[in-house]
Amino acid sequence: MKKRILIVEDEMSIVQLLMMVLAREGYEIHTCQSGRDAIAKMKQVRPHLVLLDVMLPGIDGRSVLAIMGEDDELNSIPVLITSALVESEAMFRPFPQVKGFCAKPFALKDLVIKVKQCLGDD
């Protein structure tokens, strides 16, 4: 069975790039483009990992994590934060479901390594 990854990202070019790269690695990819849609999509898809952008329309990445943390269905899903704001990494350390941080623009090779580490596929 393929592991499912949910990409929560509002920039379509990044979504398409990540979909291509991660699908090639054998993962089943699901996407959404807002924090508001992310929670519903997680409950629908039951991802093994969420790639979560920080700056999202509506509800930002930090708020998505807070909602996940209070939901017994979602609080154990590992999250890999993706952000152009390198300084925001410290803001996400207190969240136990955050397993890594990937600064944008990311080297795809490094991103794949981090994804595999988060999923225990390394």
Image: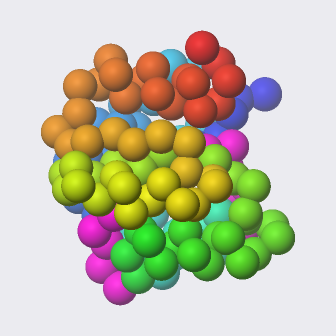
Tell which residue pokes out farthest to the top in this image.
122
Q: Is residue 78 visible?
A: yes
Q: Residue at x 42, y 50 (%)?
A: 81
Task: Give percent across and percent down for residue 87.
Answer: 23, 55
Magenta region: 43-58
The image's colouring method is rainbow
Front one among 67 and 4 = 67
Residue 110 image offset from top left, x and y in percent = 34, 22
Q: Quadrant of residue 95?
A: bottom right
| Between 81 and 12, the one nearer to me in the picture | 81
> Does residue 45 belong to the magenta stretch?
yes
Residue at (55% x, 51% y) in the render: 98
Residue drawn at 39 percent across, 63 percent down? 91
Count of numbered badges drawn on the protein? 0
Give the quarter of the image for residue 28: top right
- In the rendered view, does 48 fall on the left or right side of 63? right
The reply, left or right, for residue 3 in relation to residue 15 is right
Location of residue 105 with respect to 91 vertically, above or below = above
Q: Is residue 31 magenta?
A: no
Direction bottom: furthest residue: 58
In the depicted structure, whether residue 16 falls above or below residue 39: above
Judge whether 97 appears above or below 58 on screen. Answer: above
Q: Quadrant of the C terminus?
A: top right
On the question of residue 12 being in view, the answer is no
Quadrant (top left, top right, bottom left, bottom right) of the N terminus: top right
Identify the residue shown where x is 21% and y is 43%: 104
Residue 12's spot in the image, x, y percent?
25, 55
